[in-house]
Image (cartoon, grey):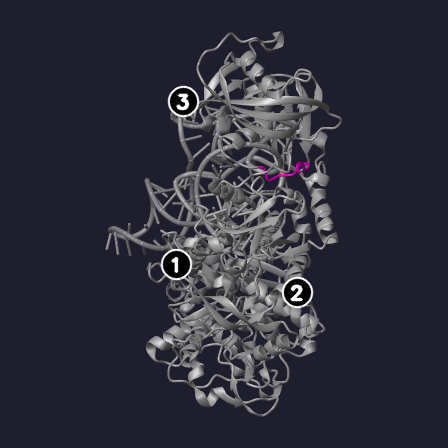
RNA sequence: GGGCGGGUGGUGGAAUGGUAUACACGGCGGACUUAAAAUCCGCUGCCCUAACCGGCUUGCGGGUUCGAAUCCCGCCCCGCCUACCA
């Protein structure tokens, strides 16, 4: 027995990494017309001092597997890498350690490169881009100038989010729960002149074009929610000689608007406030402004507000509408003012109740399921509460007949409805001493009365009574009601669960839970619009307002323009010069890039200006327009700028004439698959789509969308199930795993952990499984390779032909699954298919037969296919085995094995025999057996026959190649 | 409150209308070893059983179907995103 070569990843991994690098094995070839291109993109990392973490490994490995798989199939694959280098953590590190951010970044990047290479990721390193490289950010600045030229970049004095700790302005997106997402400091408001990008100009297209790309559903829906498009109307009201314009999505409820509310920051507040209310209003506004964002964003806080003394007129009803100021109206959305419709908006309802303002319903509720040709009936629902116990009177019809209801009934003739309600309560329950507390509006309820076999539309009015005393008389039931129900007192909580009927539930929620109706229905109390369906009334009322010059249709978005200024050193300088005469003048293109000067201190200044403001010989410049003295813009771009176009630069990374040559963009874009974290769905992904669309409009890129497909990897949590963080001490460093087990093992393990897109916990225990698998593949392969040149003396057993067919079938089955699973990004099941395959190959009997002298061809083709299938997953081991096999070239450019369905055709299939859906036997049959043959075979089974004897076979279901099911009665 | 996921053995998970629990971890037993590790072999959802046979089981309740983890209705629970957005 000769000693096989040992598996030693510490030797073979660095060896092959060096060979791959030296031979530029993974180079993407520009403009190769002979091959189809494929562009894989993984979000480039921010090079933090901590290095790569295991979450990076997951995404980069997954795309690496796909890239290798495609390359082996002959595609011209672009799988590039770069570094998103600007950002606050590096600046903070620089401040703390008195080290230039350029130096810290270079060091971190070197470490990332080393880690990527140690994992065997097949990047084309010749295309590396770095966002803080002036050769790169020259073009970031250039794109900004194009935006400026098209008026999509503008300056505005805005109340911006201000972090008092980091002394910087923040984008809305960086504020989480009123706190700065990075440092947790409560955010304040500060007025500053800011550069802003008009992303809202692209809002509709950013929604529309999602239809043309293949994004995960949750990614697309999150983007749509974030953009938050809503259609409605702007309506102008006159109050105290001022015009107040409100925005509403419910112009149909205009007649129900009983007051107006302005945000405390609304510009008209001071003008409309009457002298007598001035002190109160000033105090309220001051208090509201002093409150932190945190407090204002707390949910369930009571409504507060104050009357301005001014009133407006409702254009439909002519009624007076008091104008209030309240902080539940946000200055930043719509027009910062609303018309309040307390009958049909929960927030307005709470406010009206708190301040005793009038509530006027203008839409009649509709419940139930619409029926065709219904019979109309006038009826009531009575809800009776006993104030002593808090319980509610209910009648229980039994689970089969609709369960619990309150008291319902029809009016007789022209009977007064309240009288009907009292009569029905008495007849059905015997209770008669009731005090009326509230009455509902009329409710249209559609249902099908099964007892009478009739479709009905009832016009029901709800009555809410309290019991004044327990006296009651005997029930007076009709013959068909007797014994059908029981009368029960139930708690409100029980009622909420037990009463399922739409109409009864609606009235219960209205009277007991103080809920209001926000659904659809016909208009009432709306003058000329009465009776109109509210969906139609939306348009009718908007048009009516517009005809009179009182309003107009309007579309609003939650998405705000992108605040593009940061008061920091470590970012791209905004290429603008401020001239006292000519204003903000763009830096001429031939003067780009505007590079960052060396500075001594990186701290932002107390005035909120960036540290660049202190470098006078950098700041002082001349105006490109008039040549007079002028000052450079000292703000820099946000960290999202460099990542908003980097996938374009990968196509032509060394071009110093343009950001990328047109023909290279034509060839490589769009990105075929873009993978990244869910956390970038609403920020980076929207920003980059916006920039891309803008460049498309300038005819600078060939496609309207940057990424054809977007996927997301799940987060890897620490072993404790909590997000990895330094402070928690649960961070796993991939370096240690690579050192201990090898890169191939960590790669395979991360693929095997679970579904790619789901969140999962790191667990060292489960590493053993893949580690053993790799060891078994290695050992088995070495045995086969050794056998290749040896004559073994094992006795050939059985029929070699059948054995060959079996092995080939297993190989093809595995190949089919691995191929499909890689394409569907189901790496965990691809790995388990390979595990099943190696389990078959290493079975003692199988292995012995493979080592027979006559099986030379079989074992060689089996081993070759195994190595090729594994190559994308475990590139180093596969390369080593490939060469051990005597191959000269790299396994990674060898052809992906061809799947041949012919191999799967023969062979017997297992047929399941069921009796009444329960498995009673397994049969082995030829795949082309007829239904009749299968049935006969199934009946012949002893155990099946036993169950068939229990009754008569009513029906036989046969699914060819799968099962036979007998239905026996 | 709204939106989107999800709930399967001791654990990670597989199966998208056709043998539920593949694959792996862990556990138990055995082989090898002076011993341990590593490796190899066997068993491993629950109940009944000496074993076979059988019964039960995919969060809970109902429905559709010859057949449901999978489809439909109702409920419970968990996660993520979002939130006075008028």
Q: For the C terminus of chain A, which image quadrant? A: top right
Which labelled disc corresponds to residue A705? 2
What residue is drawn where x is 56% and y is 54%? A337
Q: CA distance from mark 3 to mark 1?
A: 52 Å
Q: Is residue A206 above or below residue A580?
A: above
Q: Are marks 3 and 1 on the same chain?
A: yes
Residue span colored magenta: A517-525
What residue is drawn where x is 65% and y is 58%? A207
The residue that label 1 is drawn on is A724
Q: Which type of secondary structure does the marked residue at label 1 adopt?
A: loop
Which labelled disc corresponds to residue A389? 3
Q: Which type of secondary structure does the marked residue at label 2 adopt?
A: loop
Q: Residues within 10 Å of mark 2 (few under 14, many from 20)?
A: many
Q: Which type of secondary structure does the marked residue at label 3 adopt?
A: loop
What residue is drawn where x is 59% and y is 17%? A419
Q: Is residue A624 above or below residue A905?
A: below
Q: Is residue A699 above or below residue A727?
A: below
Question: Mark 3 — on which chain does it sit?
Answer: A
Disc with the residue nearer the chain's start (1 vs 2): 2
């Amino acid at each position: 027995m000769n000693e096989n070569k040992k598996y030693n990843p510490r030797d073979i991994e660095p060896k092959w990494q060096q060979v791959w690098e030296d031979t530029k094995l993974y180079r993407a070839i520009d403009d190769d017309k002979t091959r189809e291109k494929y562009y894989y993109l993984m979000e480039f990392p921010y090079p933090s001092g901590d290095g790569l973490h295991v979450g990076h490994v997951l995404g980069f490995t997954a795309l690496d597997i796909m890239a290798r798989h495609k390359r082996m199939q002959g595609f011209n694959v672009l799988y590039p890498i770069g570094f998103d280098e600007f950002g606050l953590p590096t600046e903070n590190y620089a401040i703390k350690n008195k080290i230039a951010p350029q130096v810290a970044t270079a060091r971190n990047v070197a470490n990332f490169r080393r880690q990527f290479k140690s994992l065997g990721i097949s990047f084309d390193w010749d295309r590396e881009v770095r966002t803080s490289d002036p050769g790169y950010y020259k073009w970031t600045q250039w794109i900004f100038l194009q935006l400026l030229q098209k008026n999509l970049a503008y300056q505005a004095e805005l109340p911006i989010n201000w972090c008092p700790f980091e002394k910087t302005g923040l984008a809305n997106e960086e504020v989480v729960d009123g706190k700065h997402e990075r440092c947790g400091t409560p955010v304040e408001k500060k007025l500053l002149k800011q550069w802003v990008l008009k992303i809202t100009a692209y809002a509709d297209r950013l929604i529309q074009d999602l239809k043309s790309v293949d994004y995960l559903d949750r990614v697309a829906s999150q983007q749509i929610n974030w953009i938050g498009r809503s259609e409605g109307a702007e309506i102008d009201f006159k109050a105290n000689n001022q015009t107040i314009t409100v925005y509403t999505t419910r112009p149909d409820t205009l007649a129900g608007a009983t007051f107006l509310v302005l945000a405390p920051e609304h510009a008209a507040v001071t003008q409309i406030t009457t002298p007598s209310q001035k002190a109160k209003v000033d105090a309220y506004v001051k208090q509201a402004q002093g409150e932190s964002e945190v407090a204002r964003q707390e949910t369930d806080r009571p409504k507060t507000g104050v009357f301005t003394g001014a009133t407006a007129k409702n254009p439909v009803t002519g009624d007076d509408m008091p104008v209030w100021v309240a902080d539940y109206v946000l200055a930043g959305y719509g027009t910062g003012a609303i018309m309040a419709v307390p009958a049909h908006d929960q927030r307005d309802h709470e406010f009206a109740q708190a301040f005793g303002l009038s509530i006027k319903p203008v839409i009649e509720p509709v419940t139930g399921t619409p029926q065709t040709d219904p019979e109309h009936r006038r009826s009531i629902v009575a809800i009776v509460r006993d104030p002593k116990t808090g319980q509610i009177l209910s009648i229980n019809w039994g689970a089969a007949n609709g369960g619990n209801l309150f008291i319902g009934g029809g009016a007789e003739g022209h009977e007064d409805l309240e009288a009907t309600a009292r009569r029905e309560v008495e007849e059905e329950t015997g209770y008669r001493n009731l005090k009326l507390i509230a009455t509902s509006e009329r409710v249209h309820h559609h249902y099908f009365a099964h007892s009478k076999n009739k479709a009905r539309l009832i016009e029901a009015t709800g009555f809410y009574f309290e019991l004044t005393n327990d006296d009651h008389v005997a029930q007076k039931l009709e013959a068909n009601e007797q014994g059908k129900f029981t009368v029960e007192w139930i708690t409100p909580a029980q009622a909420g669960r037990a009463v399922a009927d739409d109409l009864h539930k609606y009235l219960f929620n209205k009277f007991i839970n103080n809920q209001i109706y926000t659904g659809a229905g016909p208009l009432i109390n709306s003058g000329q619009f009465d009776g109109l369906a509210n969906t139609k009334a939306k348009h009718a009322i908007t048009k009516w307002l517009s005809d009179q010059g009182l309003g107009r249709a309007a579309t609003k978005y939650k998405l705000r323009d992108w605040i593009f200024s940061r008061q920091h050193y470590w970012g791209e300088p905004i290429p603008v010069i401020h001239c006292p005469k000519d204003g903000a003048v763009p830096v001429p293109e031939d003067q780009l890039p505007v590079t960052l000067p060396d500075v001594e201190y990186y701290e932002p200044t107390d005035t909120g200006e960036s540290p660049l403001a202190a470098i006078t010989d950098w700041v002082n410049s001349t105006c490109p327009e008039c040549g007079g003295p002028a000052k450079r813009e000292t703000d820099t771009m946000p960290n999202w700028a460099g990542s908003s176009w980097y996938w374009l630069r990968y196509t032509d990374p060394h071009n110093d004439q343009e950001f990328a040559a047109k023909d290279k963009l034509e060839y490589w874009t769009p990105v075929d698959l873009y993978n990244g974290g869910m956390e970038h769905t609403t920020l980076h992904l929207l920003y980059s789509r916006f920039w891309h669309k803008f460049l498309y409009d300038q005819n600078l890129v060939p496609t309207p969308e940057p990424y054809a497909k977007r996927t997301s990897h799940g987060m890897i949590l620490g072993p404790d199930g909590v997000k990895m963080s330094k402070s928690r001490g649960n961070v796993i460093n991939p370096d240690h795993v690579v050192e201990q087990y090898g890169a191939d093992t960590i790669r395979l393990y991360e693929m095997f952990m679970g579904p790619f897109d789901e969140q999962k916990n790191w667990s060292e225990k489960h590493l053993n499984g893949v580690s053993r698998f790799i060891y078994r593949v290695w050992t088995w392969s070495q045995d086969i390779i050794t056998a290749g040149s040896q004559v073994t003396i094992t006795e050939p057993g059985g029929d070699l032909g059948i054995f060959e067919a079996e092995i080939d079938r297993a190989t093809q089955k595995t190949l089919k699954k691995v191929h499909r699973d890689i394409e569907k990004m189901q790496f965990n099941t691809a790995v388990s298919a390979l595990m099943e395959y190696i389990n078959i190959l290493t079975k003692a009997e199988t292995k012995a037969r493979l080592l027979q002298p006559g099986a030379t061809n079989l074992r060689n083709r089996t081993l070759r296919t195994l190595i090729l299938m594994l190559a994308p997953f475990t590139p180093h081991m596969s390369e080593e085995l490939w060469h051990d096999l005597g191959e000269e070239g790299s396994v990674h450019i060898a052809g992906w094995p061809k799947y041949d369905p012919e191999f799967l055709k023969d062979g017997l299939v297992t047929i399941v025999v069921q009796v009444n859906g329960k498995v009673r036997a397994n049969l082995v049959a030829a795949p082309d057996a007829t239904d009749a043959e299968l049935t006969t075979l199934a009946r012949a089974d002893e155990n099946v026959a036993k169950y068939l004897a229990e009754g008569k076979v009513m029906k036989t279901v046969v699914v060819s190649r799968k099962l036979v099911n007998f239905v026996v009665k």
